[in-house]
Amino acid sequence: MNLKCVVIDDEQHAIEVLTDHIAEMPGLTVFKTFTSPVQALTEISTADEIDLLFMDIDMPGINGLELAKNIREKAKYLIFTTAHPDYALQAFDVQSDQYLLKPISFAKFALGIDRILKKEANNTKVSTKEADQVAALYIKGDHKYAFSNIAIDEILYIKALQNYIQIITKSETHTTYLTLKEIEKALENHAFIRVNKSNIVAKAAIKKVDGNIIRLVNNEMIQIGEGYKEAFFTYVQSSLLKSNRNQ
């Protein structure tokens, strides 16, 4: 487990306390920090795939409660870190998972986050079981009782075509009346990644990456979209083999 964390607090000292605590907890990694809530609002995207969002409430410009209404859906878990106990009910309204009062000792931090880590571990087990059970997808054919069974590990990539999608496998191409968002949801527990507005690619089908171009095992080339670069190259870096030898 390696959960990506983002910290938003207008006080740098408070950010440093939280990043130190995060570094002490196995399974957590600091992804980004922001001292400006406005900057966080404009820069955080769904493509970042944030797991834990730590946010102060009393901040200039946009307070944490207002900010949460706009970016809550971009993180799996929301943890408010504040010196004010009287915002707890409002925090619940914006689907906060934890409410940690400053000063935040490591013990307080660890106890609160441990509940989330246990929940996440349990969700991962359930998702793995479901993924093992669902090794194929059925899509509708050209009449009411026609269906095609597609083995998920045969899929190379999926392309959006207005109201339809094409599913390109190692041996054939299927066209069906679905949106890219619907097929992305169906494959969320499998090794696929969105690379632009129109394409989802099987990670195992990527043969080479050269700049913004992905070459697949069937030698087709797909361009990485501007809004998807950061998430894609974060994935590549997480899978990159690195030497510990001195250069």
Image: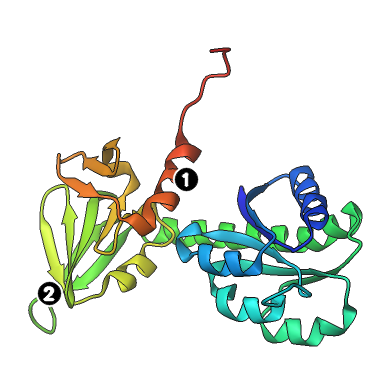
Q: Which amino acid type is marked by label 2?
A: Gly
Residue for point 20% across, 39% down: 217
In this view, the residue in front, 126 or 61, is 61
| Front of the two marks 1 and 2 | 1
Disc 1 vs disc 2: Cβ atoms closer than 8 Å? no
Residue for point 17% across, 55% down: 168
Residue for point 58% across, 57% down: 125
Spot occupied by residue 225 in the image (x, y as percentages of width and height): 30, 55
**Which residue is the site of mark 2?**
141
Residue 174 location, quadrant: bottom left
Numbered badge on residue 7: none
Q: For this view, does 60 lie left or right of residue 221?
A: right
Q: Is residue 79 above or below residue 22?
A: below
Q: Is residue 119 above or below residue 94?
A: above
In this view, the residue in front, 170 or 90, is 90
**Which residue is the site of mark 1?**
234
In the image, farthest residue toward the front: 61
